Image (cartoon, rainbow, N blue to C red):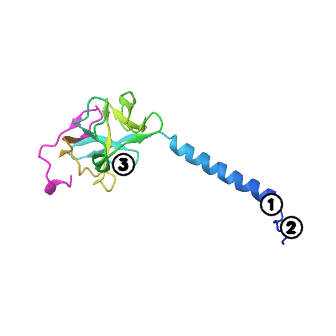
Amino acid sequence: MTRLDGGFPNSKLIATLLTAVLVCAAAGVAMARSSAATVTTHHGKLGSMLAGGNGHTLYLFTHDSRTKSSCYKTCAATWLPDLTHARPVAAAGSGVNAKLLGTTRRTNGAMQVTYNGHPLYFYAGDKKAGNMHGENANAFGGHWYVVSTKGSAIKPKKAWSPGNQGY
C-alpha cells in the first residue's frame, strides 16, 4: 500500500518504534559500560588464585608501583588490564575479599581493577578459563605472578621458560 504522497502508511508508528529500539539499544550499551568487573577464584596447581568473571587467571606485575600500572602499549597488548566501569565485585562464595578490591586510573582514564593495591591483568596467551601460561614470566621489566586470595603473588617452585608454560 503506497500513498500518493510517496509516504508509507503508519510512518509515524514506524518512526516511533524505530526510536524506541534505538533508545533501548543505547541503554543496553550504557548498562554494559557501567557494569562492574567480577573477581572470582579457581583452583590450580599452585592453589586457589584470582580469576576474572570469565574464569581467566588474573596476574600482578612486580614492576608496578603500588596501585599504579606501569604496563602500557606493547605490554598492555600482551598483559591485558582487567578494566571495570564501576567498583569491582567479589563473586559470592569465591573466597575473594571484597575489602581488598579497588581501582586505579590508567593514563587513558580507564579504571583498572586492583586487589590488595596490585593492578590486575589477564595474559593474552591464556586462551581458556583456568590457563596460567603467564605464571612467573619475566617480561617488560618485571615478573608476572598469579594472585592469591590474600592479595600476594603465588610463586611457582620451578622457573618459567617457553617449555614449561602448561601449568
Tell me where residue 93 sits by quadrant: top left
Which dot, 1 or 2, sits closer to the camera? 2
What's drawn in magenta, residue-wise? 145-167
> Residue at point 22% right, 41% down?
145
The answer to which of marks 3 and 2 sits earlier in the sequence is 2
**Looking at the picture, which amino acid does disc 1 mark?**
Ser
Residue 161, x across and y down, in percent: 13, 52
- Tell me how far mark 1 sits from mark 3, CA to CA: 48 Å
Q: Is residue 39 magenta?
A: no
- Tell me how far mark 1 sits from mark 2, CA to CA: 12 Å
> Residue at point 23% right, 49% down?
134
Q: Is residue 146 magenta?
A: yes
Q: Which numbered marker is on residue 55?
A: 3
> Residue at point 37% right, 38% down?
94
Label 1: few (<14), some (14–19) or many (≥20) C-alpha neighbours in 10 Å: few
The answer to which of marks 1 and 3 sits earlier in the sequence is 1
Residue 63, x across and y down, in percent: 22, 36
Label 3: few (<14), some (14–19) or many (≥20) C-alpha neighbours in 10 Å: some
Q: Is mark 2 on a helix, strand or loop?
A: loop
